[in-house]
Amino acid sequence: DIQMTQSPFSVSASVGDSVTITCRASQGIGRWLAWYQQKPGKAPRLLIYKTSTLQSGVPPRFSGSGSGTEFTLTISSLQPEDFATYFCQQGESLPQTFGGGTKVEI
Amino acid sequence: EVELLQSGGGLVQPGGSLRLSCAASGFIFSNYAMTWVRQAPGKGLEWVSSISGSGRIYYADSVKGRFTISRDNSKNTVSLQMDTLRADDTAVYYCAKETCGTDCYFSSDSWGPGTLVSVS
């Protein structure tokens, strides 16, 4: 199985800050990387797929980049509603595997 | 608008069985693969099983032989029959619609609200 490692585990930030989260795959996954946002008690929400394609309705302050084994999610100008946990997920092959999550908190 | 309504779940003793269902609307159901993902309390996300639009099936090793995924394209539903449940199956279970089509699995663009399965 492909292992996904996210960092940092958590990050403290303020409204207006820019935050970058990193996800590393244990082997090359091309650009088959997705990012999700999850708030407490809620289902995950797809933000980005295929590394950098923004899901419909997601604000452009979210962006993704990378390829192969290293990927990043950047949230520019954090808004109050962005405080949540973020997960990466590889879609190169089944089983889908997820990173451990990054909590973005105030 | 895509909607996934989940039912089933609850408290069951170890060794018992439960059936989860997910009713889909707002898209051509048979054109998309569907996936179950679970999340143990306070933990991350774990892929459980997927089924293609035509019924091709995939399982995580942790549930293979115990869980059975199925779909009814005439009723727009996907189900997960869970047998021989163990304490480590305790989790919120989400059904999700795959983004790309009938038999590809690179991301899930719509998720149900989740249903709690407690094995104790």
Image: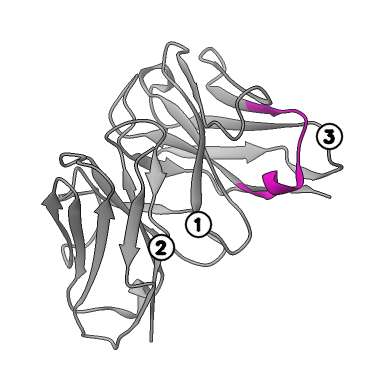
Gap between marks 1 and 3 measured at Cα = 24 Å
Instruction: Identify the chain of the residue marked 1, using the numbered disc in the image.
Output: B
Gap between marks 3 and 2 measured at Cα = 31 Å
Front in this rendered view, residue B61 or A80: B61
Q: Is residue B16 above or below residue A35?
A: above
Residue A40 in the image: state x and y as whole percent: 53, 67
Q: Which mark is residue A101?
A: 2
Front in this rendered view, residue B24 or A33: A33
Marks 3/2 in contact by CB < 8 Å: the verdict is no
Which residue is identified by label 3? Answer: B15
Q: Do the residues indicated by labels 3 and 2 lie within the same chain of the protein?
A: no
The residue depicted at 19 percent of the width and 42 percent of the height is A50
Front in this rendered view, residue A27 or B64: A27
Q: Please check the rendered image and state whether residue A74 is part of the magenta-colored stretch, yes or no.
A: no
Which residue is identified by label 1? Answer: B44
Q: Secondary structure at mark 2?
A: loop
Mark 3 Cα shell of 10 Å, populated few (<14), some (14-19), many (≥20)? few
The residue depicted at 73 percent of the width and 41 percent of the height is B9
Q: Do the residues indicated by labels 2 and 1 lie within the same chain of the protein?
A: no
Q: Please check the rendered image and state whether residue B83 is part of the magenta-colored stretch, yes or no.
A: yes
The magenta-colored residue range is B80-92
Q: Quadrant of residue A62?
A: bottom left
Gap between marks 2 and 1 measured at Cα = 7 Å
Instruction: Answer with left or right where residue B72 lies relative to residue B87.
Output: left
Q: Do the residues indicated by labels 1 and 3 lie within the same chain of the protein?
A: yes
Q: Quadrant of residue B69?
A: top right
Q: Quadrant of residue A79?
A: bottom left
